[in-house]
Image (tube, helix red, strand yellow):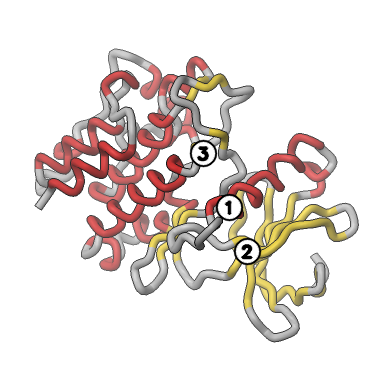
Amino acid sequence: MNQEFAGYSISRSIAGGGMTKLYVALDAQKNRYVIRVLDPVASRNRRSRKQFFHGGEVITRMHHPQPHPNIVPFVKAGYEGKTPYMVLEYIESRTLRDLILYREPLLTENVMIFIRQLANVIQYVHSRGYLHLDIKPENLLIRPDGRLVLIDFDLALPRKRFFKKLRNVAGTTAYVPPETLVDHVADDRADIYAFGVCCYEMLSFRKPYEGEKIEQVRAAQIDPKTPPVPLRQHSPNVPAALANVVMKCIAKNPADRYPDMVLVLRDLNRLT
């Protein structure tokens, strides 16, 4: 990456994911932005390019007619030469993954605030007609003031009231529900499952299925005889009512899960 890119000055790289690289960059007025760049191999693939730009289009829809405080703001997208790129507003933050890994007081002292913010933003995405399909701690930024920001809408798909057949299964295995892993189908309950896993981690610093290898995790997730470890087994101090909400979100059978984020919010708001 050259120091100058698409009219911006690259100051440093930051952790990327999958097929993209991320850079912090400055414009002519020294304002900071994040530039997402599709890697050279993926840039040659038409489907990868389409998916990359699709994420920016969905973010734009999420902010219309009014900006949403819990979704990363989109600036623009285009090509620099043959390289697809996307510019997003820079957010001073850490990922939820970092807070979980280091058991940061910002998380432990405000966990219910983060859980409710996450539930609300997922419900908002659904209300705007989309499934996010990549809810995970790495895609959740936490600002120093405690505001949660959802990023990376590349996998988002139009929401249906029935199972939607997926062409392929993307996302991170631990946050993908069994029916998606096995049958390549998803509806609201896919995001609800991922929400539940994130909450489980925030409350216990563990995952409901764990293994040394990703294959072991996947095998446990899809095995109907292997239930998730009860949340209170890891964290007995979690109130039973809250644990019940989380465990219902990650129920192995989608029929046993909440069918709508509105109902998750209803039960969260009933907690004292």
Q: Where is residue 217 in the image (x, y as percent from the top left)?
A: 41, 28
Residue drawn at the location 30% of the way across and 34% of the way down: 208
Q: Tell me which amino acid carries mark 1.
A: Ile
Q: Position of residue 93 (x, y in %)?
A: 46, 68
Q: Tell me which amino acid carries mark 3.
A: Tyr
Q: Mark 1 points at which residue?
A: 59
Residue drawn at the location 28% of the way across and 53% of the way down: 116
Q: Mark 3 points at which residue?
A: 130
Q: Name the residue under label 2.
A: 88
Per the image, label 1 sits on a secondary structure element best described as: helix
Q: Position of residue 226 (x, y in %)?
A: 29, 19
What is the CA distance from the residue labelled 2 to the residue labelled 3?
Answer: 20 Å
Residue drawn at the location 23% of the way across and 33% of the way down: 247
Identify the image quadrant of residue 29. Answer: bottom right
Residue 234 visible, this angle: no
Circle nearer the N terminus (2, 3): 2
Identify the image quadrant of residue 127. Answer: top left
Per the image, label 2 sits on a secondary structure element best described as: strand
Mark toward the viewer: 2 or 3: 3
Report whether 60 appears left or right of 237.
Answer: right
Circle nearer the N terminus (1, 2): 1
Figure check: 260 above or below 237: above
Question: Are the residues tagged 1 and 2 within 8 Å (C-beta)?
Answer: yes
Q: Nearer the viewer, residue 12 or 151?
A: 151
Circle nearer the N terminus (1, 3): 1
Q: Nearer the viewer, residue 194 or 14?
A: 194
Identify the image quadrant of residue 174. Answer: top left
- Quadrant location of the N terminus in the rendered image: bottom right
Numbered circles on residues, count: 3
Question: Are the residues tagged 2 and 3 within 8 Å (C-beta)?
Answer: no
